[in-house]
Amino acid sequence: MRIATVTDSTCDLPQELLEQYGITVLPLHISKNGQSYLDGIEITPGNIFAHVAAGGEICSTSAVNVFEFSACFQALGQDYDAIICVTIGAEFSTCYQNACLAASDLAEKCSVYVVDSRNLSSGQGLLVLEAARLAEAGLLPDEIVSRLEAAREFVDASFILDRLDYMRKGGRCSAVAALGANLLQLKPCIEVRNGMMGVGKKYRGSLEKVMAQYVQDRLAAWEPADTGEVVIVVHPPADEAPLAAARQALEKDGRFAQIWEAHSGCTVACHCGPNTIGVMFLRHKNDTSRGS
């Protein structure tokens, strides 16, 4: 049975993996100065950062629409027996709802299974990758969906923010909180919990030192899963020193067979700003702790 894997551009997977598994990525829409651009095709995080640095307003994102999902599903339905579509979490975007509407409209033409990742960025990407691997292994669509819905509860997805002005301008952080964090050199950890974002531990100091401690904390709190053993370091344009600190901490830990690095798309860039760095992996399925 031939099964296609579809996702949206928030998934933040390395291009090498997208090509290896033939994953179809639909771009979100990025609004800048009243104009709409396709994420990763017509606009990049670097474009957004340059725009804001020049005094422009924070850019915003909007979902892949029903028509775009429908066109993609119809095209793939001509060559595949079924389609697994893994979207950014429904609490973050209407991509999931739009994909469900498109799938329902096409129910008589092609078999589309839509999964809410309850995540974003490479946390979502880990589930997309799992979907493609399971399809390649020959599992049936219902089995793949069941496994993805179980696995999504064990994705460890978090970021360290280097600055809060993007969140402040986007209305997600007060000016007073941003000023206080800057004065104290605080770097908050943003975690995905139960399908939503929340603030975890607040670190203090240079981003390079923070990244080393952050990686240690994530791995000490939640053991990496024993299947796959993959971790993804994800970021928009960022300084090399903190990235190297994250990589070195992961290599020193030694529990991951593969350390992938992914460049995040415009969703992370719009909301979090430059030098945002995340580390994402799967926890052990017998670990039910929810530390911070």
Image: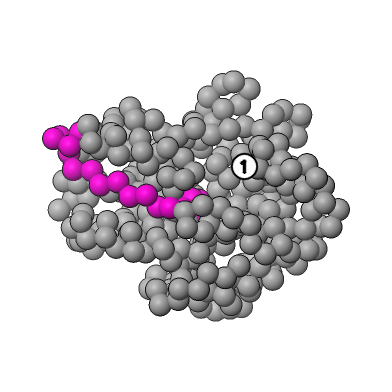
Q: Can residue 2 be seen in this view?
A: yes
Q: Which residue lies furthest to the top in this view?
A: 34
Residue at position x 67%, y 64% in the image: 201
In magenta segment, residue 107: yes
Horizontally, is 176 left or right of 200 in the view? right
Q: Position of residue 169 (x, y in %)?
A: 70, 36
Where, quadrant-wise, is the C terminus in this rendering?
Answer: bottom right
Q: Dot 1 surroundings within 10 Å: few (below 14), some, or many (20 or more)? A: many
Magenta residues, as a range? 106-122
Q: Is residue 230 left or right of residue 176?
A: left
**Quadrant in the picture for residue 140:** bottom left
Measuring from the top left, give residue 124's x and y in whole percent.
Answer: 44, 53
Determine whether the residue tagged by mark 1 lies in a helix, strand or loop.
helix
Q: Which residue is under mark 1?
A: 271
Residue 15 appears in view: no
Q: In which quarter of the image is residue 49?
A: top right
Query: What type is the residue that disc 1 sits on?
Result: His
In the foreground, 18 or 208: 208
Residue name at image x 47 percent, y 54 percent: 195
Judging depth in this view, the residue of 52 and 238 nearest the camera is 52
Left-right relation of 14 to 129: right
* Residue 238 located left or right of residue 155: right
Residue 3 vs 65, above or below: the answer is below
Q: Residue 7: x and y, percent?
A: 37, 45
Q: In which quarter of the image is residue 172?
A: top right
In the displayed structure, 262 sits above or below 279; it is: above
Q: Magenta stretch: residue 209 in it?
A: no
Q: Which residue corresponds to the image point at 13% horizontal and 35% vertical from the top-left? A: 108
Tell me which residue sits at (76%, 29%) in the image: 55
The mark total stands at 1
- Residue 256, horizontal then vertical, whole percent: 49, 74
